């Protein structure tokens, strides 16, 4: 087992190289709009609360045609998850944390902060995840410190680490004990959401009535996103959220006014930097 200081030094070197765009595996350019699959039907979100700016632009990102529609060809069995866990602890935990919640020591000074991938991976299609892992985060609109892993990890390794991260988020595996960081905790997420809404009301961004509508709908939207992902749905959060809200309105579980309020609150909180 390599020592944490080694990983931190490795991360620092890689981040510097990525920032200078001089790595041996520079991110491929995103294709032009006429060959991309748009993920812009509505205002999707990881529903993670707190740090980071530019959240709305990141969630409105598009999946290049080369990646759109891909599904994970590697069964998420014990062997794949074990391989993915080894890769994750070596290459990912220093920034994303052992539990995949974006709180590793190497990510403390990054802006935007590392994503809470254990949670968000439950609500994103395989194609989106494989694209993001492969092509780096240095391109707009992400502008993060993550390098392009396609030049370092082969395709199976990238799919294995996606299987591991999704297993982390679902609770199928326990986090390692390498770099530190919390595991996903629904109770903590609920507390963060309540604080986010309270801050939004206090700052005059949303009303108490709007906060109540958002809180009531949020859990249902999250749960259905996870179900869609488990059933093999592709795309990003925008696409999934549009389908979910439309279905809830069509079934009579939500009114159109409630759906519109949810999206409006989501957008305003994101633009204010209260939601990541």
Image (cartoon, rainbow, N blue to C red):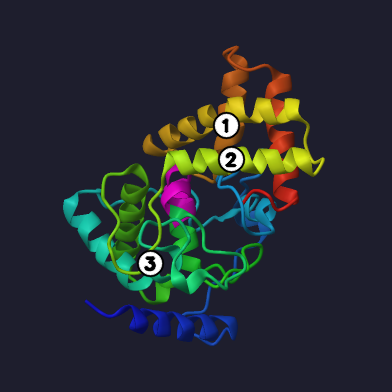
Q: Where is residue 170 in the image (x, y as percent from the top left)?
A: 34, 43
Q: Nearer the viewer, residue 24 or 176?
A: 176
Q: Does residue 59 lie above or below 104 as drawn? A: above
Q: Nearer the viewer, mark 1 or mark 2?
A: 2
Residue 76 placement, left or right of 149: left
Residue 90 placement, left or right of 1: right
Q: Where is residue 104 in the image (x, y as percent from the top left)?
A: 44, 67
Q: What residue would you read off at disc 3?
A: 93
Q: What residue would you read off at disc 1?
A: 218
* Badge 1 or badge 2: first in the primary sequence: 2
Q: Could you tell me which secondary element the residue under label 3 belongs to? A: helix
Q: Does the magenta stretch include residue 123?
A: yes
- Structural crowding at the residue carrying mark 3, measured as other residues with C-alpha within 10 Å and reported as few (<14), some (14–19) or many (≥20): many
Q: Position of residue 137 (x, y in %)?
A: 55, 67
What's the CA distance linking mark 1 and mark 2? 9 Å
Q: Residue at x 48, y 56 (%)?
A: 67
Q: Can residue 43 be seen in this view?
A: no
Q: Which range is magenta?
A: 118-129
The quarter of the picture where residue 250 lies is: top right
Q: What residue would you read off at disc 2?
A: 193
Q: In which quarter of the image is the N terminus?
A: bottom left
């Amino acid at each position: 087992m390599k020592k944490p200081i080694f990983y931190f030094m490795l991360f620092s070197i890689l981040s510097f190289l990525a920032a200078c765009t001089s790595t041996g595996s520079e991110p491929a350019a995103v294709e032009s709009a006429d060959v991309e699959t748009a993920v812009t039907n509505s205002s999707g979100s990881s529903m993670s609360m707190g740090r980071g700016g530019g959240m709305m632009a990141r969630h409105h990102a598009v999946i290049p045609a080369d990646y759109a529609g891909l599904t994970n060809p590697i069964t998420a069995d014990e062997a794949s998850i074990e391989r993915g866990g080894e890769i994750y602890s070596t290459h990912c935990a220093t920034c994303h944390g052992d539990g995949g919640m974006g709180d590793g020591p190497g990510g403390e000074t990054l802006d935007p902060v590392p994503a809470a991938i254990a949670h968000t991976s439950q609500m994103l299609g395989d194609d989106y995840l494989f694209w993001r892992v492969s092509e780096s985060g240095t391109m707009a609109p992400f502008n993060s410190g993550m390098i392009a892993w396609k030049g370092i990890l082969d395709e199976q390794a990238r799919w294995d680490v996606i299987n591991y991260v999704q297993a982390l988020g679902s609770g199928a595996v326990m986090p390692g004990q390498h770099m530190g960081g919390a595991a996903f905790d629904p109770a903590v997420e609920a507390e963060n959401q309540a604080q986010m809404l309270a801050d939004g009301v206090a700052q005059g961004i949303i009303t108490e009535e709007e906060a109540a509508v958002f809180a009531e709908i949020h859990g249902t939207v999250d749960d259905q996103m996870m179900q869609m992902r488990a059933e093999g749905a592709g795309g990003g959060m925008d696409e999934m959220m549009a389908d979910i809200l439309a279905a809830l309105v069509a079934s009579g579980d939500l009114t159109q006014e409630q759906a519109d309020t949810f999206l409006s609150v989501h957008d305003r909180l994101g633009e204010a930097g209260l939601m990541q």
